[in-house]
Image (cartoon, grey):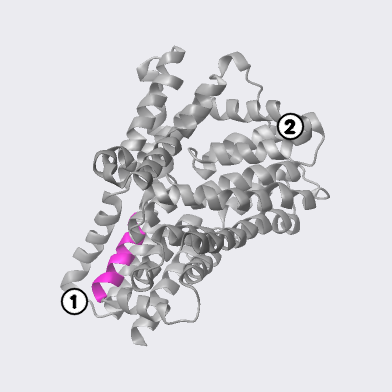
Amino acid sequence: MWNLLSVLLAVGLLTLLIAWGKVQPLLAFVAAALAAALLLGVPVEKIPGTIEKGIGDLLGSLVVIICLGAVFGKLIADSGAARRIASSLIQALGPSRLPVALTITGFVVGIPLYYNVGFVLLVPLIFSLVYQSGRPAVMLAIPLLAGLSIAHGFLPPHPSPVALVSAIHADMGTTLLYGIIVGIPTLILAGPVFAMTLSRIQAQPTAAFRSADVPDAELPGVFNSFFTALLPVLLLAATTLLIMARPDLNGSLSFLANPLVVMVISYVVAIFTLGLMRGQKFAQVMQGPAEAMREIAPILLIIAGAGALKQVLVESGVSAELGAALAGLPVPPLVLGWLVATLIRICLGSATVAGVTAGGIVAPLVQTTGVDPNLMVLAIGAGSLMCSHVNDSGFWMFKEYFGLSLKDTFRSWTLMETLVGVFGLLFVMLLSVVIS
């Protein structure tokens, strides 16, 4: 009983420091890890080493993948490939199907781009379409932002799913395939279907966010843009499916299926297809990575801090005890993982913090119950997107960009994120029945 209370006190301290004290998340995680270690009786001489080990173990396997994902996404954005994908889909589907085109755009562009980058890059495109078509801004924005959100919460190489794959010992390729299977129906319901109920919300987007029209001649080609942006997905999916179909090839394909190798190949290809082959000099192409590293640094620090707290729970033995206690509850393990992530998300606001923190808490549950770890990654991802409200930066970005009242922001943005989380869990549960 004391051990469980100690964990709750440590998580409560973490919540208080971040939500009320506005403490930088890494520092808050380290403080919570120190408190948990002392409360759980970890010998004081072992506490510093335990925290350092937790940070090193989790970051060691992730830092290169996440950084490569950041520079790859930056190149997709800076080259104009993301804009080409959006404009080609809108042109192909026609003005009458704008919500569908924006739904696909958000999902496809959201795979290589981190959420905040995708938001800032594509919201001006929405405003341009609003001015051209006269359609309600929120009704056009929600399908696109739902696609970005689902990719952010469910799909590698985004930081939270990548960190969860490592913490729960899932498989990156299988998680990606399952994430796409779960994400598509979730996106349809939380995106264009839900958006049809928002036509009466009157947004006041400022003209300052309207982007200048870029001539098509200056953008990469359609095939080049789609192929390069989706190359990590294609490589991971292809190698995973081949290994499933031909287990005897596992040894020879394991190298190509490794996420690190996939991201290196994808980035090298992008340097040529979106940079050098379009007349840019190598030094010019290399200007993007420095900015991308600055953008991704806060997320790496969050993951590092989560690793410290996770290692304290493992070292003290409470992790296994907590897993056994959770397994004994009359609730499906996937729902428990989702619920833990949801509670942390509501308290802390950040989807990334909610995901990686919940992963450290429920990781033993995967071992004690035998639940599919790939599905647990997705269940936690769905919970980490739930109930976005005033402690989430995404809530305020949406409100201010679209000039909405708090009531209309809750009615549109918060409800969309909640629908993503609820339907995400529902389809994860259905998939678990199919593959069991």
User: Residue 170: x percent and y percent?
Assistant: 36, 56
Of helix, strand and loop, which one carries label 1? loop
Image quarter for residue 68?
A: top left
User: Residue 192: x percent and y percent?
Assistant: 71, 46
Q: Is residue 423 left or right of residue 372?
A: right
> Between marks 1 and 2, how big is the CA–CA gap?
61 Å
- The disc, 1 or 2, on the residue closer to the chain's N-terminal end is 1
Residue stretch in magenta? 304-316
Residue linked to disc 2 = 129
Q: Nearer the viewer, residue 178 or 192?
A: 178
Magenta stretch encompasses residue 311: yes
User: Residue 306: x percent and y percent?
Assistant: 36, 61
Between tags 1 and 2, which lies in front?
A: 2
Q: Would you say the magenta stretch is mainly helix, strand or loop? A: helix
Image quarter for residue 135?
A: top right
The crowding category of the residue bearing disc 1, from other C-alpha atoms within 10 Å (few below 14, some 14 to 19, many at least 20), is: few
Q: Is residue 95 left or right of residue 108?
A: right
Magenta stretch encompasses residue 369: no
